[in-house]
Image: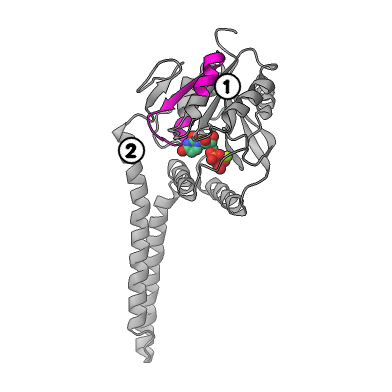
Amino acid sequence: MPDVPELSVVIPAMNEEENVRNMHDRLVAALEPVVDGLEIVWVDDGSTDSTWEKVSEIAATDPRVRGLSFSRNFGHQAAVTAGVDAARGRAVAIIDADLQDPPEVIAEMVVKWREGYEVVYGQRAHREGETWFKKVSAAAFYRTLRRLAHIEIPLDTGDFRLMGPKALEAYRALPEHNRFVRGLVSWIGFPQAAVLFHRQPRAKGETKYPLKTMLKLALSGFTSFSFVPLRAATWLGLATASFALLYLVFRAVSAAVGFVAFGSAGLVASIFFLAGVQLLAIGALGEYVARVFEEVARRPLYLVKESTDGKTGVIPPER
Ligand code: UDP
Ligand code: MG
């Protein structure tokens, strides 16, 4: 194997014991013939099953495999970042552990990368075995984000992608805590290309992305790449103030011609309405303030309990 493998594959995994072996075999079969040196980096994101044991087992017999295990669950985006930090390959691909993204597609990404694209992302042409709720909410989220964000995030992509050396250097230099990986990778720019693929149903196990986690990720996406929710308060304020002025004029005129428009019900409703609008605006502000706090606190993004390299704790990026 060459000193620097041509490709590292990063796999974030939380409770994926049933998928580790299969994933490994399929990756090796698909990529070993096409790349000059392959490395596989597993990131165990605080699994409570035997994921880490399975990874260590494979790593003990296969020198291409490395792995690290978090001190607790830090989340998918932190796991992806840890893997990218630890990877030694010239290019790095990120793939989910559940075989929803076919490992064979990475071979196509490598071809595109060699053509000169620094980022090659997998774009879902078709989703199988996912609930209609997930499909509809994902479609709505990506389309709204596209409208609100000040960067161009391609539709229907996840974190399944490959980054070349320049993109990697840029990505590793991004210090932010609130990581919305697909947004960050778009933000760095460079020539980017898509590879279309059919998203498969999860091979084994259950989704690790319940609604709550999905919402959190969506909020990270909005707050990291759009100030529209903050500015919305300004526009709402302007709109309600204008409405109040118009209303005053309306009341003055109707008093002059001698009829009364609303009673106390109107008053109560408008108080509640305005209180709601104000709380909403404060809430939006709070989301940003909380994130500013997280950024200035500068806690490490993840902590490593155990790794195949013997490193633990706060690990600086490999390259
Ligand atoms: N994952 C993780 N940490 C988490 C949640 C998920 O590392 O807190 C991993 C998970 O093991 C999988 C990938 O992230 O490899 C995507 O998760 P999943 O397939 O459950 O999400 P879905 O495809 O249902 O959106
Ligand atoms: Mg999945």
Bin the neighbour count of mark 2 within 10 Å (Cα to Cα): few under 14, some 14-19, many 20 and up: some
Regarding residue 171, the answer to whether it shows in the image is no
Tell me if residue 239 comes above or below residue 31 in the rendering. below
Q: Amino acid at mark 1?
A: Gly
Mark 1 vs mark 2, CA separation in Å: 29 Å
- Callout 1–callout 2 Cβ contact below 8 Å: no
Whether the residue carrying mark 2 lies under 8 Å from ligand 1 is answered with no
Q: Quadrant of residue 290?
A: top left
Q: Indicate whether residue 74 is drawn in magenta.
A: yes
Comparing 130 with 35, the one in front is 130
Percent position (x, y) of residue 186? Answer: 54, 34
Left or right for 20, reference 319: right
Residue wearing tag 2: 294
Tell me if residue 185 comes above or below residue 317 in the rendering. below
Residue at x 69% of width, y 26% of height: 108
Q: Amino acid at mark 2?
A: Glu
Percent position (x, y) of residue 160? Answer: 59, 33
Kindly state the secondary structure of the residue where label 2 is placed.
Answer: helix
Left or right for 296, reference 15: left
Q: Quadrant of ligand 2?
A: top right
Comparing 180 with 25, the one in front is 25
Q: Indicate whether residue 78 is drawn in magenta.
A: yes
Percent position (x, y) of residue 274? Answer: 35, 67
Comparing 182 with 66, the one in front is 66
Residue at x 39% of width, y 80% of height: 250
Quarter occupied by the N terminus: top right
User: Tell me, what colour scheme is on the image?
Assistant: one colour
Left or right for 212, reference 142: left
Kindly state the secondary structure of the residue where label 1 is placed.
Answer: loop
Residue wearing tag 1: 164
Residue at x 37% of width, y 84% of height: 262
Q: Which residues are magenta?
A: 55-80
